[in-house]
Amino acid sequence: MAVWTPTAAVIGADSLVHTLDGEKRWSKCKIRRAAPVVWSATGITGNPDFNFSLDRLVGEAMSGQGSLDAKIKAFETALFAPLSEVVHVTRIENPSWYYRYAEGLAVTRLIFTANEDGVNRFWMREFVVQSARIGDEIDISVKRTDCPGPTCRDFRVFLLGNYDYASRIANEVGFWERNGFADGVRRSIEAEIASNPDHVGPPITIAEVTKDGVRWVENGECGEK
């Protein structure tokens, strides 16, 4: 979950992850740093059988040359081939999961934020599977949301992963005014954990990004101070 304004961004996440079949579950840091950005992702985020790792791909893109926008674009380009391969094999080996959770949907969603010259930049990227039939090649398109931008104005909330209960809390009238950004993010995630413990679990991590840098409000599994 993230809250964006032109001067600050607050990102919060639970720590529970699991395999597609749900047989293996563990805790993991979901808010990462790759200078100059703080980022998080949901969906298909890695597969060692295919040497596919978002951590590696984001790190390589952010260490490259060019502007922040150019680095985000380089990451998009680098992700297409390995993500397509993973989704293609999953469609063959686990078609019931594919047709329920992948076809026509975003299989990987990421948010990036960084403060640039006193303005908080925010990028959301959603990688959507377009192809439906077994015999077709996997085709992945990118849905892009950038802040500042025409869809952001002065305040916007972004929700990723499992958020049915979190969204109910976050959309209450006056919720953010009463709680502030960091506490509001925490309360929303706590509501999801309480109501959806099979898919969302503690500890909670919260990071705030401003012109003064990155402040870890809650460390969770991430360990940064």
Image (cartoon, grey):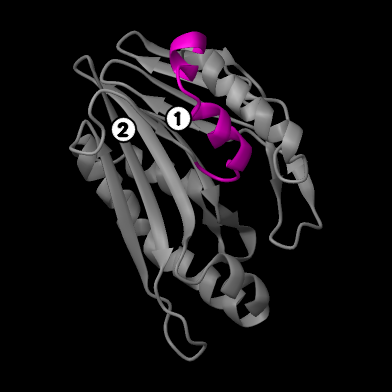
**Which residue is depicted at the point 67% across and 36% down?**
28
Q: Which mark is residue 2?
A: 1
Q: Residues within 10 Å of mark 2 (few under 14, many from 20)?
A: many
Q: Is-magenta flag for residue 200? A: no
* x and y, in percent, of residue 151 in the image: 24, 38
Location of the C terminus (image quadrant):
top right
Q: Which mark is residue 122?
A: 2
By secondary structure, the bulk of the magenta-drawn segment is best described as: helix
**The image quarter in which residue 76 lies:** bottom left
Which element type, helix, strand or loop, lies under badge 1? strand
Estimate the spatial distance between the alpha carbons at disc 1 and disc 2, rounded to whole Å: 10 Å
- Left or right side of 144 for 29: right
Q: Which mark is residue 220?
A: none
In the image, farthest residue toward the front = 173
Does residue 36 appear in this view? no
- Left or right side of 213 for 134: right
Eyeballing the image, is 120 above or below 108?
A: above
**Which residue is depicted at the point 66% across and 76% down?**
96
Q: Which residues are magenta?
A: 160-179
Residue type marked 2:
Phe
Does residue 9 appear in this view? yes
Residue type marked 1:
Ala
